[in-house]
Amino acid sequence: MSSLNDHKKFRNQKLECSFMKPVFNKEEYGILSEYGAWMNALHSGSISPMTQKQKEFCDNIKKQKPPTGKFAKIFWMYLKRKELLKKGNLVNQKILAKDDREDWKKIRKMRF
């Protein structure tokens, strides 16, 4: 069983989650960056849950459906987005085609 000091050690760490900015609002992003390393340690088994809520959090994260708890939902979305990032299916930017042909320049200037 993990001690309180083990939990505090992970609570004081910050999680790199900048790839989540397009998905989360300011509050959710703040929660993830503040508690993310700790939630990740709980999820990975680096520390064991000390309370019933922490056990429920771990159980909720293991499900395939999005959990209902606020913290669990945020961390679940983080994990799923991280999977997409590893697979290369994550696109944060729109790729705009550049077409400088004369006829397209005229069309873009037209007003409808």
Image: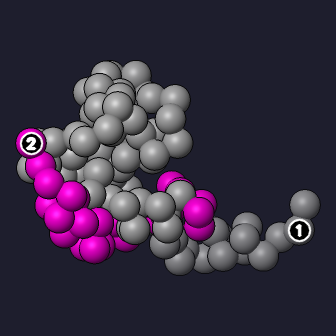
Relative to the observer, which residue lies in front, 53 or 105? 53
Of the residues shown, which amino acid type is indicated by label 2?
Met
Residue 108 rendering spot, x and y as whole percentages: 72, 71
Magenta stretch?
A: 1-27
* Residue pictured at 23% horizontal, 40% vertical: 49
Q: Quick check: 93 left or right of 4?
A: right
Residue 78 rendering spot, x and y as whole percentages: 35, 49
Of the residues shown, which amino acid type is indicated by label 1?
Arg
* Residue pictured at 25% horizontal, 73% vertical: 13
Residue occupied by mark 2: 1
Decide if residue 85 is in sight here: no
Which quarter shows the C terminus?
Answer: bottom right
Residue occupied by mark 1: 111
Residue 4 rendering spot, x and y as whole percentages: 21, 58
Q: Quick check: 105 left or right of 94?
A: right
Q: Nearer the viewer, mark 2 or mark 1?
A: 2
- Magenta residue check for 45: no
